[in-house]
Image: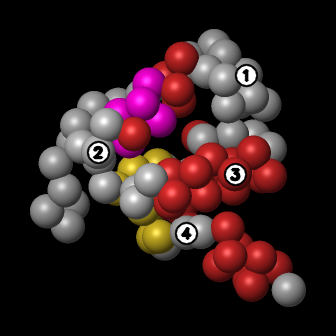
Amino acid sequence: VQGWVNQGEYIDEGISGLTTKRPGLLALLDECKSGYTDVVVVTDVCRIARNLALCLEFIEELKALGVRTEIISWGGAISFSSVLTSIK
């Protein structure tokens, strides 16, 4: 999609999404820190974390690394500030 190259899937089957301390999610973060990833695509926000605050913190951490987050069910790029604006 949009000229992106799939660098892999990060899956945490059987591990609660109530924490961001999951092997797959941490591996994704490491990949982003390496500088080889500039976009993370997820099907739904709950794939990052079940807690919205944790999810937004993770998205902001990616943003600080220069990595954009695309959430398909929300129609594209998302950031902490855009979510807060839409809630108001």
Nearer-N-terminus badge (1/3): 1
What amino acid does circle 1 point to? Ser
Identify the mark at residue 57; answer none if there is no mark.
3
Among numbered discs 1 and 2, the one appearing first in the sequence: 1
As for residue 87 lying within the magenta part, the answer is no
For image coordinates 31% across by 37% down, the residue present is 34
Residue type at mark 3 is: Glu
Tell me the distance, in whole angstroms, between the alpha carbons under discs 2 and 3. 19 Å
Q: Nearer the viewer, residue 31 or 69?
A: 31
Circle 1 residue: 16
Closer to the N terminus: mark 2 or mark 3? 2
Looking at numbered disc 4 in the image, what kind of residue is underneath it? Ile
- Mark 3–mark 4 distance (CA, rounded to whole Å): 12 Å
Q: Secondary structure at mark 3?
A: helix
Relative side of 84 to 64, left or right = right
Residue beneath label 2, please? 35
- Residue at the extreme right of the image, as rendered: 88
